Image (spheres, rainbow, N blue to C red):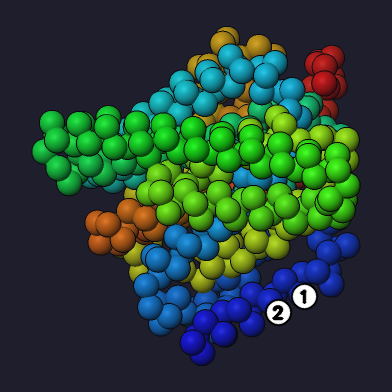
Amino acid sequence: MNDFNVLVALLGALILCLSLLSAWLAKSPLPPTLIGLALGVAIGPHALGLLDLEAMGDKASLLEKAARLALGIGLVGVALRVPSEFPRKNWRELLTLIGAGMVLMWIVSTTLVYLILGLPLWMAALIGAILTPTDPVAATPIVTGELAEQHIPERIRHAISFESGANDGLGYLFVFLAFLMLTMPAGEALAHWLVTTLLWEVGAATAFGLMLGYLSGKLLRRAEASGAIKQEWRLVYTVALGLLAIGAGKLIHSDEVLVVFATAAAFDQVVNASDRKNEEQGQEAVNRFFAIPIFVLLGSAIPWHGWQQLGWQGPALALAVLLLRRPLTMLALRPLLPGVRSVPDALFMGWFGPIAVAAMYYAAVIEQKLGEPMIWDVVSLVACASVVAHGISGAPLTRLYGRVSASTGAEHA
């Protein structure tokens, strides 16, 4: 209990300090995700020693719960950020980006893990699957704010947001296919994956989430029409919806991350968007409150000894995944994506597909099932490399992309 109180007090103190410096942070080229990671390293067991997740008990369980909560709140924010008409107008492109894009990223990531680390194929496929989804929490600082609105076209910002939300949940399919192939005979694993994973844990999760989001949206609209709800409670309602979805998804033993995204997407199609801008700003503030602690936890949970044991292959893998996993995918899919109108569009979307909270979540889930610490060693290294690389490059590359797009006459809308 004392360790938990220390954790709560430390996180609260850090957020208080960052709040007092928020005006300076808004002008800083470094996003809150990177600052949170650095603070986590500073207070972790290998620096100041103020926070040690290992001493609190089950580190993997704690990281799983924290990441699940951050994803639940973040995915609702993604739904509010993307206009409701965008997925309706661009559904073919989004299906290609999410479906074919995830398969290609999984293949590239698996190949890199297999070749560089020399792991058995299905273990490489498992780690590759964990590294496949792009992350909505880490992507938020890239696609929101004045800098993003000034330099990044809406079609690119909305595509990155929607994709990062959808493929977090769908990554479950790839992660558990590899996990089942590692732990069961092939025939039994495929049967379990088709019946339990695909039909129930993913299919039923999607249907449940869509129903929950639709009903929640209808109830909100009815309450607004009758004057039963005050305007300032809309934000409370959306945050509560995210918590309900993430908790209910776990209770029905389904893909709870997909439940949240499906809920938020359906909710967004039903609710009145007249006050979207104010609500979006409020939701982003809530997202920031939940996002900073998860990156502090990541920084404090870095397995420095495990990274050292990976040798040169660890940094080589992280670099290769960042440079190849998504950029190659976006360049390959560009002819099939009408919204990606140029090579700079493809390169920008290809680079800014961060790996962070979703990878933490899946790595923590699998570590509890397999008891293999190397998975966390590899995933945490790539995730930290992504947070640092995308955090440092976010502002300058956004400005560069804006200048290149303007010089070539590309449309901003």
Residue 283 in view in this figure: yes
Q: How many marks?
A: 2
Looking at the rendered structure, the secondary structure element under dot 1 is helix
Residue drawn at x 77%, y 75% is: 17
Q: Is residue 160 above or below residue 18?
A: above
User: Which quadrant would residue 262 be assigned to in this image?
Assistant: top right
Looking at the rendered structure, the secondary structure element under dot 2 is helix
Residue drawn at x 46%, y 21% is: 100
Q: Is residue 230 above or below residue 167?
A: below
Is 167 on the left or on the right of 60, as rendered?
A: right
Tell me where residue 208 appears, x and y as whole percent. Answer: 50, 38
What residue sits right under mark 1 in the picture? 17
Q: Which mark is residue 13?
A: 2
Amino acid type assigned to the residue bearing label 1 in the image? Cys
Q: Which mark is residue 242?
A: none
Tell me where residue 103 appears, x and y as whole percent. Answer: 41, 26
Viewer-proximal residue, 213 or 96? Answer: 213
Tell me where residue 69 appears, x and y as whole percent. Answer: 56, 58
Residue drawn at x 78%, y 39% is: 222
